[in-house]
Image (cartoon, grey):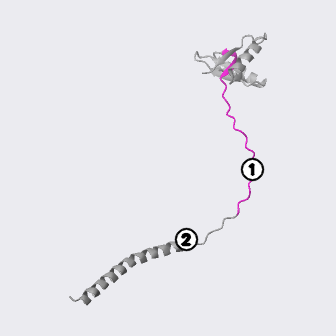
């Protein structure tokens, strides 16, 4: 082979490699074009949101359940305990019936979550003749 044919063969190889690499770029360009078309869809404008009046945030206070109860009476029959509970509620007390492990039903007329307040109230209540038999039940 002559020098001219070697140069011509070399040029053909360079051009063919260059064209084959350009074909892949053309494919990616087509992909970009399709994504651009999708992005150019009509955008729906949302109506402007109305300003909302800011509410004053109040602190969240978790109510501690009552653990200490002033017991007025204890009954074997639940019906008797329910009668006394209803009577106390009509008098304005927050009365509850508590089941005891010995099968009795304890009727409370006041509950406390604070131990110190419960014992102070027990002391005050026992000072009266009417409630001298009141006792404190500690729910566990």
Taking the spot 57% from the left edge, 72% from the top edge, the residue there is: 41
Cβ–Cβ under 8 Å for marks 2 and 1: no
Quick one: which residue is furthest to the front in this view?
Answer: 3
Compute the Cα span from label 2 to label 1: 37 Å
- Left or right: 45 in relation to 53: left
Residue 132's disc number: none
- Left or right: 7 in relation to 134: left
Residue 71 occupies quadrant: top right
Segment colored magenta: 48-74
Tell me if residue 131 is in the magenta stretch. no
Label 2 sits on a secondary structure element that is helix
Question: Which quadrant of the figure contains the C terminus?
Answer: top right
Residue occupied by mark 1: 54
Closer to the camera in the image, 100 or 56 = 56
Residue occupied by mark 2: 39
CA neighbours of label 1 inside 10 A, class few (<14), some (14 to 19), many (20+): few
Closer to the camera in the image, 126 or 37 = 37
């Amino acid at each position: 082979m002559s020098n001219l044919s070697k140069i011509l063969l070399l040029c053909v190889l360079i051009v063919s490699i260059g064209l084959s690499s350009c074909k892949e770029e053309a494919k990616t360009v087509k992909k970009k074009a399709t994504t651009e078309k999708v992005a150019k869809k009509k955008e729906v404008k949302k109506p402007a949101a109305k300003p909302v009046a800011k509410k004053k945030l109040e602190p969240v206070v978790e109510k501690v359940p009552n653990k200490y109860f002033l017991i007025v009476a204890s009954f074997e029959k639940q019906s008797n305990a329910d009668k006394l509970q209803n009577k106390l509620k009509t008098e304005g007390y927050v009365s509850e019936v508590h089941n005891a492990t010995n099968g009795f039903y304890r009727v409370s007329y006041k509950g406390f979550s604070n131990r110190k307040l419960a014992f102070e109230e027990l002391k005050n209540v026992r000072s009266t003749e009417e409630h001298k038999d009141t006792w404190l039940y500690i729910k566990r």
